[in-house]
């Protein structure tokens, strides 16, 4: 361990890896503010671990009741009660389970007792979670919001002392954009995110009282910018040509909040006015460099989507190097290194730029 960072928060990948490592024995409960990506961890685990040995089971804790989990059913022949476990847990098929107890701290108190035994003893009622045929053990983890978020998350102290509470931070704009590029998020949304890193700040960070974009427990606003709401806004922006401007603005405001929606409008209006990627590649030293930084960033996002080889990257770098601001140039460098590292790290112009601008990096 080279250096310990006592920020007492993990990122989403660290949370996922922790669950894989300790979740068969100790139950991590990942806590964060709304919309940060907690619920996506189950899918990330499935992508990492595969389904040969595991079933991946999602439990939406606040909407479950006792009969959704297990029940004692009379056996009239033996005049006794027999314990029946819900098919939700897929017991008896020879696979270990990876069980996500989503929004655990919002579950009814009686169910928290049932889930606590699942977390501590790896049993559903009296029935133990199985190992796979190859000896893989079942994993249990939970998610919930910070108590300070004010959305109804509570947990008894003696129960909390038996699990591993793991605070998870929000992604940075760069981290979110790396994910967004791989998941088809609309280009104006990604460009807006790159130009507005404060939208990825937390209300728990210092000096965020005047941040109009983010979730705040003290605010009555129901719509705000989060990694989740930004991703949801993509479908609205992608259909901007078939809805009215008023519908576009209103639906964005209802997804990411009015302040962010107004700010995004400039990026959305730019998309049809930019110099195309093909034109830049054909004449990187001759096409006009837009004066507007937002336009420059939008063009760079298009390039990152389309670049597939060293020749095109070198050509586009000729255009990027004509942008006056080295800070704006650094956005392109960062995006390429995160999204297309196998191309970027071996490109001479990229490496020359990095050497010349190492103080920025």
Image: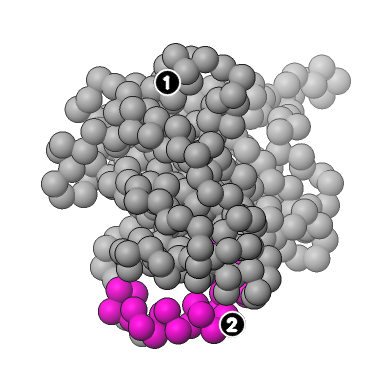
Q: Give the range drawn in magenta.
A: 336-361
Checking the image for residue 41, the label placed there is none
Q: Please name the residue shown 57% across and 74% down the image.
A: 314
Residue 58 appears at what percent x and percent y?
Answer: 62, 38
Task: Read off the residue under disc 2.
Answer: 346
Q: Which residue lies furthest to the front in this view?
A: 286
Q: Which of 133 and 21 is in front in this view?
A: 21
Residue 66 appears at what percent x and percent y?
Answer: 58, 23
Which callout, 2 or 1, points at the residue further toward the start of the chain?
A: 1
Q: Which of 338 and 104 is in front in this view?
A: 338
Position of 75 relative to 170 (above/below): above
Q: Pointer 2 and pointer 1: residues touching (CB < 8 Å)?
A: no
- Prevailing secondary structure of the magenta residues: helix
Q: Please name the residue shown 56% across and 42% down the image.
A: 185
Label 2 CA crowd tier, 10 Å (few <14, some 14–19, many 20+): few
Q: Pick the quarter of the image with the C terminus.
A: bottom left
Element on which disc 2 rests: loop
- Residue 70 falls left or right of residue 145: right
- Residue 103 falls left or right of residue 79: left
Residue 81 appears at what percent x and percent y?
Answer: 71, 24
Instruction: Quadrant for residue 280, please give it.
Output: bottom right
Instruction: Quadrant for residue 2, please give it.
Output: bottom left
Q: Which of 100 and 210 is in front in this view?
A: 210
Task: Read off the residue under disc 1.
Answer: 249
Determine the CA span between mark 2 and mark 1.
42 Å
Q: Is residue 170 visible?
A: no
Q: Please name the residue shown 28% across and 47% down the image.
A: 198
């Amino acid at each position: 361990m080279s250096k310990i960072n006592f920020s007492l928060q993990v990122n989403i990948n660290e949370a996922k890896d922790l669950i894989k490592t300790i979740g068969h024995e100790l139950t991590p409960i990942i806590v964060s503010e709304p919309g940060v990506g907690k619920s996506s961890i189950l899918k990330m685990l499935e992508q990492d671990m595969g389904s040969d040995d595991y079933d991946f089971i999602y439990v939406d804790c606040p909407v479950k009741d006792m009969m959704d989990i297990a029940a004692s059913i009379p056996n009239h022949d033996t005049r006794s009660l027999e314990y029946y476990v819900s098919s939700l847990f897929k017991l008896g098929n020879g696979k270990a389970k990876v069980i996500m107890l989503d929004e655990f701290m919002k579950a009814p108190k009686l169910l928290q007792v049932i889930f606590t035994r699942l977390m501590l003893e790896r049993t559903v009622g009296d029935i133990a979670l199985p190992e796979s045929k190859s000896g893989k053990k079942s994993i249990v983890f939970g998610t919930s919001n910070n108590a300070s978020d004010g959305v109804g998350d509570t947990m008894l102290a003696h129960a909390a002392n038996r699990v591993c509470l793991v605070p998870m931070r929000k992604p940075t704009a760069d981290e979110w954009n790396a994910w967004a590029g791989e998941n088809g998020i609309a280009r104006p949304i990604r460009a807006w995110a790159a130009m507005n890193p404060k939208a990825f700040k937390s209300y728990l960070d210092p000096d965020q009282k005047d941040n109009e974009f983010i979730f705040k427990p003290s605010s009555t606003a129901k719509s705000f910018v989060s990694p989740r709401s930004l991703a949801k806004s993509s479908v609205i922006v992608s259909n901007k040509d078939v809805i009215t401007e008023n519908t576009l603005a209103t639906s964005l405001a209802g997804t990411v909040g009015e302040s962010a929606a107004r700010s995004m409008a400039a990026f959305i209006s730019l998309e049809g006015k930019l110099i195309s990627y093909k034109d830049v590649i054909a004449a990187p030293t001759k096409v006009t460099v837009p004066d507007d930084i937002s336009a420059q960033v939008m063009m760079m996002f298009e390039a990152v989507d389309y670049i597939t080889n060293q020749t095109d990257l070198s050509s586009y770098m000729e255009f990027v190097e004509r942008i006056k601001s080295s800070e704006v140039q650094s956005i392109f460098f960062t995006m390429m290194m995160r999204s297309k590292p196998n191309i970027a790290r071996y490109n001479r112009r990229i490496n020359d730029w990095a050497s010349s601008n190492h103080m920025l990096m």
